[in-house]
Amino acid sequence: MEKKTAFAKAGEKAPLIWGLGFGILFGFLLHKGGVTKYDVIVGQLLLIDHTVLKVMLSAIVTGMLGIYLMKTLGWVKLSPKSGSLGINVIGGLIFGVGFGVLGYCPGTIAGAIGNGYLDALVGGLPGIWIGAGLFAAIYHKVRDGILKKGHFGDITFPGLFKVNDWVVVIPTATIIVLILVWMERSGL
């Protein structure tokens, strides 16, 4: 068997390094956008502060355009995971309960911990570990039951409509940008 060179080993770590770098950048941008603050998150839940919605819509447009550009250029290959109504309902409930109880989502917990917020460190991080552990413990029992209910496979909108990705991406990005412009102009 052939030994791997240090260069080959470093190449295997490149995705992890890129992921760490983008994670740090994402956390920094969450902080700069103000969405790592408990008051901003609670304001969004009370529908009086739309900062989180604006940041997330901006991230969706940026990520969507970026990933489909990289796909078009052949830099990445997308492998969507199959989904179901059961997965979405269970995931939404777990996410929603944690979000409602603590006022953070997993991304903002990481950003808040990075900012030194103890509530995120003491409540959020253990909450993520406990929730993930409990789900892992029951996964084999629910995998073929409730998680398969309403199974819709790995279909994407371009696949569903049988069109080029950009036929869906460009109008979707345009609509989101128009919503963001409308929100800014209306003072939301």
Image (cartoon, rainbow, N blue to C red):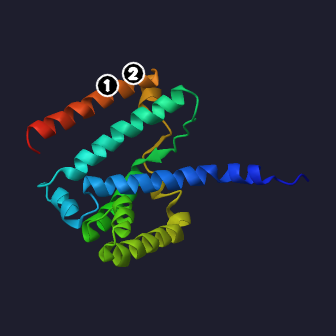
Front-most of residues 38 and 141: 38
- The image shows residue 57 at horizontal and vertical percentages of 28, 42
Instruction: Estimate how packed mark 1 is, as few (under 14), some (14 to 19) or many (20 or more) residues with alpha carbons within 10 Å.
Output: few
Asked whether the beta carbons under mark 1 and mark 2 sit within 8 Å of each other, the answer is yes
Looking at the picture, does residue 55 appear above or below residue 120?
Answer: above
Looking at the picture, does residue 62 appear above or below residue 74?
Answer: below
Looking at the picture, does residue 182 appear above or below residue 131?
Answer: above
Front-most of residues 69 and 100: 69
- Secondary structure under tag 1 reads helix
Total number of numbered labels?
2
Amino acid of disc 1 = Pro
Residue in view at x 44 percent, y 35 percent: 66
Front-most of residues 184 and 90: 184
Residue 42 as seen in the image, left or right of residue 139: left
Instruction: Estimate how packed mark 2 is, as few (under 14), some (14 to 19) or many (20 or more) residues with alpha carbons within 10 Å.
Output: few
Q: Is residue 153 visible?
A: yes
- Residue topped by disc 2: 167
Q: Is residue 148 visible?
A: no
Amino acid of disc 2 = Val
- The image shows residue 138 at horizontal and vertical percentages of 51, 69
Residue 188 as seen in the image, left or right of residue 111: left
- The image shows residue 123 at horizontal and vertical percentages of 34, 76
- The image shows residue 179 at horizontal and vertical percentages of 20, 35
Q: CA distance from mark 1 to mark 2?
A: 7 Å
Quarter of the view holding residue 165:
top left
Q: Residue 67 shows which numbered tag?
A: none
Residue 185 as seen in the image, left or right of residue 84: left
Q: Residue 171 shows which numbered tag?
A: 1
